[in-house]
Amino acid sequence: MTEKSLLEHVRLAINPIFQDWVLFENGTYIIFDNIDTISNIENEAIRQMKEFGPVNTGGTAGDFSVTHLNQTDGWVVSGHGYGMYTYVNPTEIESKSPTDVEIGIHGRSKRNQDGQNPKIIHVNKKEK
């Protein structure tokens, strides 16, 4: 999946009322409620990704829930860290009818990659 198609899927996955968010290379994104109060959104997103992205065995970062999307193909995996989600495309999963556990584990591994090596590929800010 290319960055452009990843961006398109994530745009469709996020409720349009949320306009302020940062997307990382492996599909993890952080929605911000208070972007106007943050002096450097990229630095804050990387700080949060380093804190909440990595998965530590037995820690709260391993917990997840899976949301099935209506506006685009795939799922969103949420878990530890407020406003942090990971998009999973059906092409990334081998099974044609994956369980929520399979989707969640894959999403958590993508989030872990973003947490270990955070690279921002898009910053979305609402128009003023």
Image (cartoon, helix red, strand yellow):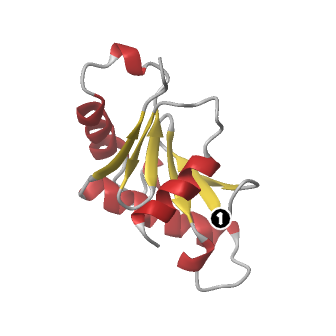
Q: Nearer the viewer, residue 23 or 85?
A: 23
- Residue pushed farthest top? 37
Residue visible at 48% across and 23% down? Answer: 127
Residue 42 seen in the figure: yes
Tell which of 60 and 15 is nearer to you.
15
Residue type marked 1: Gly
Query: In the drawing, does residue 88 fall left or right of residue 111?
Result: right
Question: How far across and down, in percent of the image, does residue 80 sit?
Answer: 48, 43
Residue matched to label 1:
74
- Residue name at image x 42 percent, y 51 percent: 59
Q: Residue at x 27, y 36 (%)?
A: 42
* Image: 15 above or below 66: above
Instruction: Where is residue 6? Give x, y as percent.
Output: 49, 61
**Residue 44, quarter of picture:** top left
Q: Residue at x 39, y 62 (%)?
A: 26
Against 90, residue 74 (above or below) is above
Q: Quadrant of residue 104?
A: bottom right
